[in-house]
Image (cartoon, rainbow, N blue to C red):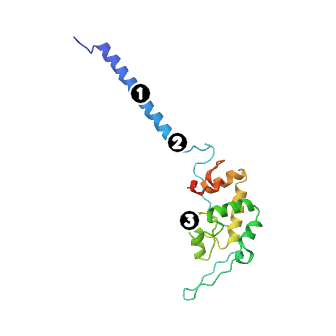
Amino acid sequence: MKIFTEDNKHRTLITVSFLAGLILTAAAYETGMWFRDNYKFQNPFVPLIVPLEISPIVEEQKVISIPSTTPAPTIKHEADSKGKSAIVTSSKYPDFIDHIWLRESGRGTSKTGLNASCAKRGMSNDFGFAVSVNHCFTDFATSVRRLERWYDDNTGLTYQEKLCRYNTGRTIKECAYLTLSFMDMN
């Protein structure tokens, strides 16, 4: 008795192909679900790579070269005489800037991070601006002006979207940065 006749071979091939297709479809579906759970899709008309703006506002700053034999002079910043909170309050966007100031450096009280590193160098960055390149501003007022410019450059976004984009680099409506839940921020 012959089990595999020509007709049976054809049916077996179709059955095996069908089962293989089902298995591949299930694997593709599971991979897609895993991808969806672990990654977020962005608007296709917005570039996936958001350009990092690291150029600070350079306003009336002079480059001073100090000979290595003399000690570095103590630099008195505008923030020392006027007060950092007064500079934030008198800025164009005080709520936005204060929000970032609180979350990035605890309004300048954090003893770690970029703000502490810049303070050791006699400079300022209490806003976590351009952390990837360890950027420091010459003074606090200059960093506030840079945040004002960043706010103006992102005029098409809502207030919440601006805060989320500042923190995550993505334009989203809600993020942990909007709350005081610091543990949710990565």
Of the numbered discs 2 and 1, the one sitting upstream in the chain is: 1
Quarter of the image with the C terminus is bottom right
Instruction: Look at mark 1 in the image and give the residue it sits on.
Output: 21
- State the CA–CA distance, disc 3 to disc 1: 49 Å
Report the disc number at residue 37: 2
How many other residues sit within 10 Å of disc 3, few (<14), some (14-19) or many (≥20)?
A: few
Residue 177, quarter of the rendered image = bottom right
Nearest the camera: 26 or 58? Answer: 26
Q: Amino acid at mark 3?
A: Val
Residue 127 in percent (x, y) is at 64, 64
Task: Name the residue rendered at 64%, 53% in the picture.
Answer: 164
Residue 174 in percent (x, y) is at 65, 48
Q: Which residue lies most toward the left here?
A: 1
Q: Amino acid at mark 1?
A: Gly
- Select label 3 or label 2 by which is in front: 2
Task: Name the residue rendered at 42%, 31% in the picture.
Answer: 24
Task: Name the residue rendered at 73%, 60% in the picture.
Answer: 95
How many other residues sit within 10 Å of disc 2, few (<14), some (14-19) or many (≥20)?
A: few
Count of residue discs: 3
Instruction: Look at mark 3 in the image and give the residue it sits on.
Output: 133
- State the CA–CA distance, disc 2 to disc 1: 24 Å
Residue 19 in percent (x, y) is at 39, 25
